[in-house]
Amino acid sequence: MALLKILTYGNETLRKPCKAIDKITPELIELAKDMLETMYDAPGCGLAAPQIGKNIRLVVIDTAIPDEEDPNPYIMFNPEWEPEQESEQVSHEEGCLSLPGIWGEVTRASKVKVRYMDINGNQQEISGCEGLFARCIQHETDHLDGKLFVDKISAADRAMNASKLKKLAKENS
């Protein structure tokens, strides 16, 4: 396995919608494992393919607490989510490996259902995703549509982070 370079804000790849994956190949499985290693090393709890320069619909997620819980990684090809019926809109602070040092309050669904293809090419569905796992699913799938969490933060949070965003954009454009 190998550590991959994480692209940062200002890189145009982060703003491009990604292509669906038709078939799971050994190369895609290896890429997903490299993405997990990269995410753990960063450290983070989610990573999407565009963050490492790949324009494909692939995310990896592990919200287990390091040194307290066993790793519980998810590799999701073509993930799609929808809010559960009893879901509410909740606000929580978010950050992103592609936006180092930038944080902001983002409102998202509190409970979601996610459908995806696993590494064996089988369709999976997980209902009742809550907390950090639900937030991470939404955050990472946003990346697949070319959206970043800073697109969803308040004007006050945007103003507070404006100089950092401008600096990152200049460094990476």
Image: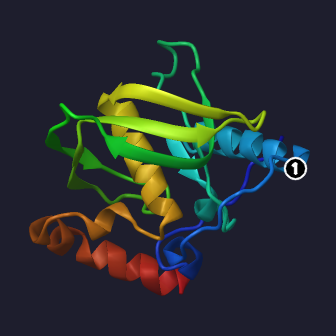
Image quadrant assignment for residue 22 = bottom right
User: 131 or 129: nearer the eye?
Assistant: 129
Identified by mark 1, the residue type is Glu
Rendered residue at 23%/36% (across/down): 110
Can the viewer see residue 6 in this picture? no
* Quadrant assignment for the N terminus: top right
Q: Where's residue 60, x and y in %?
A: 60, 42
Left or right? Give the position of 34 relative to 19: right
User: 89 or 14: nearer the eye?
Assistant: 89
Q: Where's residue 133, x and y in %?
A: 40, 32
Q: Where's residue 139, x and y in %?
A: 40, 51
Can the viewer see residue 64 in this picture? yes
Secondary structure of the residue carrying tag 1 is: helix
Position of 129 relative to 104 (above/below) = above
What crowding class fits label 1: few (fewer than 14 Cα within 10 Å), some (14-19), or many (20 or more)? few
Left or right? Give the position of 62 relative to 55: left
Q: Where's residue 26, x and y in %?
A: 89, 44
Rendered residue at 15%/38% (across/down): 88
Q: Which residue is mark 1?
A: 27
Left or right? Give the position of 154 relative to 6: left
Position of 106 relative to 134 (above/below) = below
User: 73 or 94: nearer the eye?
Assistant: 73
Q: How is the image coloured?
A: rainbow
Image quadrant assignment for residue 19 = bottom right
Looking at the image, which residue sits at the far right? Answer: 26
Rendered residue at 28%/35% (across/down): 84
